[in-house]
């Protein structure tokens, strides 16, 4: 079978797993405001709608926790294919649902796929990519998520004009198509060379690495041999230390890194982006914005477009500056939205609506809120969105990478579940204050990143021990622009050895 071996092509196709995550996000947000959905499912409000929305996150949590065992045992690639099958099963159940319980079951099963792919796609991408473009190719995952959100939302927007239950059944059924493409297409893609080495398929690991790094698959290329030796040395060192168990995740050497990877993904969820992705219709209703479906669709387009710059330049910008700039800017937009709602809003006299606080007769304030929401989405897409995907698989060694990233994804889905469940009742109870809550989360995220998150751009995955254990305060890496040349030095040594021989 002919294999696809271009790194960009592999990373872009693998990101289709992220596209399924995007489909999940929009699978509810584009429908909850339609009359057909509300009528068929009994006008779910508050906690009931929160349970429907968060049910997929519950399945994703289980999938994320399972990803480390399956990804290490079966390979990253085969586990992603299993996820695609689960997605198809979940989509069929959702599109055929006859009530809320069946809908929840379908979303939980589909969530298992999202949990597996959200953890393993970035690992797979980072393990096949050269260090100099690793950030760029892993950002494909974030871009695919935004594309999935946008495509699914516009499918739902088009179907919303249907008068029957097909208005929501058809969009849920269409989700099967990308999953089938993902499942079948992966047969043409290679296994991760680092995974192959971890299961002692050394010859195949070298061959795949050479095909990924050179045009003619030259296994004698000095850079290929240098990278292969780095992987080999790390794996053999790990085996001598017998350090590949879950216990090492809480060891003195690794627990800070594991907690940091979990925190980055958790803060990304708590940044306020989830309010805008899942419940933008409710917010726009509260702000008195008309033509809800069309206006809310623009944020998904903005999200997709603004993910393009990081895809091109994230390996020049770095991870740490993006996080440190993104958090305070997001805080500013959220505080501004909360302040506008407080100043110009009033209690909603209608008690059967999802919003108990509304703006009436202040069009300038409503438009200002809309602008802040759009700017918040753009800020997230440029900063926290891509970096939260890149960072967790970068900062831990191969022996615990799948386990650590599964915990990071699990923390993401715990936060996602909590937000999906709690935001609808929070919007009804604390009203405008919810924006100040999420703004405060961004302040806390800034503090943690400043103190604990070093810069990792253009470092090999095998060099992360040096990055975290150089003895200096980690916040000083904000000023450290030195790029690693360790791999090139090793390649030169190999070439010199040949010349001497």
Image (cartoon, helix red, strand yellow):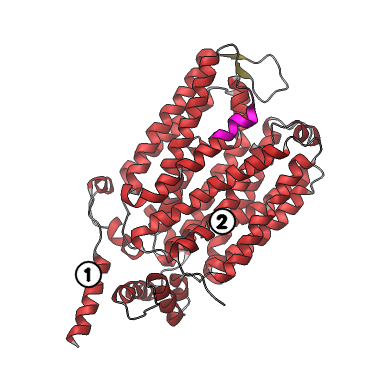
The N terminus appears in which quarter of the rendering?
bottom right
Secondary structure, mark 2, is helix
Residue ID at (47%, 75%)? 196
Residue ID at (50%, 58%)? 12
Does residue 272 show up? yes
Q: Which residue is mark 1?
A: 489
- Picture coordinates of residue 87, whole percent (x, y): 67, 56
**Residue 438, placed above or below residue 75:** above
- Picture coordinates of residue 149, whole percent (x, y): 58, 44
Does residue 263 show up? no
Query: Overall secondary structure of the magenta stretch?
Result: helix
Q: Which residues are magenta?
A: 290-298
Depth check: 152 or 327 in front? 152
Q: Which residue is mark 2?
A: 16
Q: Is residue 414 left or right of residue 388?
A: right
The quadrant holding residue 322 is top left
């Amino acid at each position: 079978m002919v294999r696809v071996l271009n790194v960009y092509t592999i990373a872009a196709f693998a990101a289709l797993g992220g596209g399924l995550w995007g489909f999940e996000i929009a699978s509810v947000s584009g429908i909850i405001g339609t009359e057909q959905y509300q009528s068929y499912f009994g006008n779910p409000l508050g906690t009931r709608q929160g349970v429907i929305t968060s049910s997929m996150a519950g399945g994703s949590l289980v999938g994320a926790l399972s990803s480390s065992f399956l990804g290490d045992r079966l390979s990253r690639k085969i586990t992603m294919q299993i996820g695609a099958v689960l997605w198809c099963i979940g989509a069929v159940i959702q599109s055929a649902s006859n009530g809320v319980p069946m809908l929840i079951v379908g979303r939980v099963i589909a969530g298992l796929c999202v949990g597996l792919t959200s953890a393993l796609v970035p690992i797979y991408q980072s393990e096949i990519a050269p260090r100099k473009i690793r950030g760029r190719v892993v950002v494909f995952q974030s871009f695919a998520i935004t594309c999935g959100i946008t495509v699914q939302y516009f499918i739902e927007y088009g179907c919303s004009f249907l008068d029957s239950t097909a208005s929501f059944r058809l969009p849920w059924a269409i989700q099967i198509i990308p999953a089938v493409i993902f499942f079948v297409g992966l047969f043409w893609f290679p296994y991760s060379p680092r995974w192959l080495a971890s299961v002692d398929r050394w010859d195949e690991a070298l061959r795949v690495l050479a095909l990924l790094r050179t045009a003619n698959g030259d296994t004698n290329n000095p850079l290929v041999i240098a990278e292969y030796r780095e992987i080999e040395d790390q794996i053999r060192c790990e085996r001598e230390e017998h350090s590949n168990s879950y216990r090492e995740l809480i060891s003195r050497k690794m627990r800070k890194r594991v907690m940091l990877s979990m925190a980055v993904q958790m803060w990304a969820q708590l940044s306020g982006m989830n309010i805008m992705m899942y419940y933008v219709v409710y917010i726009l209703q509260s702000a008195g914005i008309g033509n809800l479906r069309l206006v809310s669709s623009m944020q998904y387009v903005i999200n997709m477009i603004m993910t393009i710059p990081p895809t091109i330049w994230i390996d020049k910008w770095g991870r740490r500056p993006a996080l440190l700039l993104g958090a305070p800017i997001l805080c500013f937009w959220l505080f501004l939205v909360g302040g506008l709602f407080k100043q110009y809003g009033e209690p909603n006299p209608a008690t059967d609506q999802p919003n108990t606080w509304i703006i009436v007769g202040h069009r300038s304030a409503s438009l200002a809120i809309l602008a802040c929401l759009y700017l918040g989405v753009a800020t997230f897409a440029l900063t926290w969105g891509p970096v939260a995907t890149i960072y967790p698989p970068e900062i831990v060694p191969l022996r615990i990478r799948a386990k650590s990233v599964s915990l990071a994804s699990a923390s993401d889905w715990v936060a996602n579940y909590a937000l999906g469940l709690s935001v609808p009742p929070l919007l009804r109870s604390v009203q405008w204050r919810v924006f100040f809550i999420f703004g405060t989360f961004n302040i806390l995220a800034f503090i943690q990143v400043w103190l604990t998150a070093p810069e990792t751009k253009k470092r090999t995955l095998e060099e992360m021990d040096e990055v975290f254990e150089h003895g200096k305060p980690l916040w000083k890496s904000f000023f450290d622009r030195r790029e690693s040349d360790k791999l090139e030095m090793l390649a030169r040594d190999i070439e010199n050895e040949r010349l001497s021989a």
